[in-house]
Amino acid sequence: MFKGSITALITPFAEDGSFDETAFRSLVDWQIAEGSHGLVSCGTTGESPTLSHDEHRFVTEVCIEEARGRIPVIAGCGSNSTTEAVALIEHAAQLKVDAALVVTPYYNKPSQEGLYLHFKTCAEAVDLPIIIYNIPGRSVVDMSHNTMIRLAGLPNIIGVKDATCDLARPTRVAIDIPDGFVQLSGEDATALAFLAQGGVGCISVTSNVAPRLCARMHEAWMKGDLNEAQQINQSLLPLHDALFSESNPAPVKYAVNLLGRCGRTLRPPLAPLSKPAAAMVREAMSGLDLFE
């Protein structure tokens, strides 16, 4: 179920900072029409740290409602409070999402045993597939290989979104964890290499802007057309670089705005994109003919 190009959706805001439900519904429909293989609501790209709990729940509700079962929806449910994470997972389960994405607890810096207990508690709370989100660059903690193996033995822990940029990890996981453990890249620029090392897809920022190209790259890989996959991957690299020229999601929200699909509004403490970064984004999009 979880494979290919899965878009970590931005959360559009109106000029007054409120959730722009109309723009969000349109984005969901466009992503599906363009061939994306799945959606993630309320991830980091969706500015989840600045959504209230009520907004967080509502955004996921709208995503599920608008997707209408056409492609899988994964709900971002992470928190550095285990109790809060469980509450978000319980709500997501009620909505009948396809899985919950749960990040390693940030700021607290839990030990490996703390990470294990956190995810074990989340997994045992409800009968909902859970994907571990390992992103040391934002959470400060890194889940070890041994902890991943322990957690993979729990029935509801079905996979990982790996944003470590360590391309040896997916191979190690494929060797030591039974078949069926879903490995998704969390880094657009290395997504194709991640597939070659044992991954099955990518939870993507870039697919907010170029969903059809991202989906085509994964489909080329799935059918064994490495030349096409490499060509698309190379063509996308300038856009990957531009979309991470400043803190995500400032560049990607600017890019989606250039496509006329949402406003540029970000919630503090994120700042508007600088002029040099904006020029970089525009140039990369022009190079892919995304304005046509």
Image (cartoon, rainbow, N blue to C red):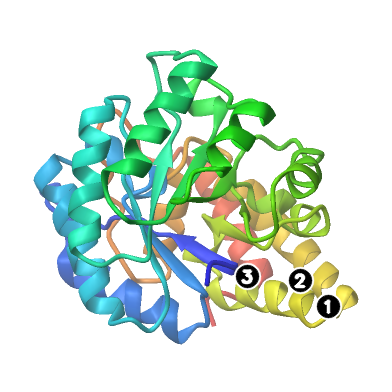
Instruction: Specify the amino acid type for callout 2.
Output: Ile
Locate residue 249 relative to residue 92 in the image: left or right: right
> Residue 243 or 273: which is nearer the viewer?
243
SS at circle 2:
helix
Q: Within the image, what quadrant is residue 289 found in?
A: bottom right
Amino acid of disc 1: Glu
- What secondary structure is marked by label 1? helix
- Residue that carries the numbered disc 2 in the rendered image: 232
Left or right? Give the position of 3 relative to 34.
Answer: right
For the point 40% across and 41% down, the residue is 102
Report if residue 187 is visible in the image: yes
Q: Residues under labels 2 and 1: Cα distance?
A: 6 Å
Which residue does the image show at 27% across and 43% down from the upper left? Answer: 125
Let me know if residue 276 appears in the view: no
Work out whether residue 66 or residue 212 is closer to the camera in this orientation and state it: 66
User: How packed is label 3: few (under 14 Cα within 10 Å), some, or many (20 or more)?
Assistant: many
**Disc 3, SS:** helix
Q: CA distance from mark 3 to mark 2?
A: 8 Å
In the rendered structure, are the residues bearing label 1 and label 3 in contact, judged by CB atoms less than 8 Å apart? no
Q: Position of residue 7 (x, y in %)?
A: 48, 63
- Residue contact between numbered discs 2 and 1, judged by CB atoms under 8 Å: yes
Residue type of the residue flagged with mark 3 = Cys
Q: Which residue, given by chain and number where applicable, does mark 3 sit on?
A: 214
Q: Residues within 10 Å of mark 1 (few under 14, many from 20)?
A: some
Q: Earlier in the sequence, mark 1 or mark 3?
A: 3
Residue under pointer 1: 228
Report the disc number at residue 260: none
- Left or right, 46 with reference to 51: right
**39 relative to 88, above or below:** below
For the C terminus, the quadrant is: bottom right
**Residue 13, percent across and down?**
21, 54
The residue shown at (82%, 52%) is 197
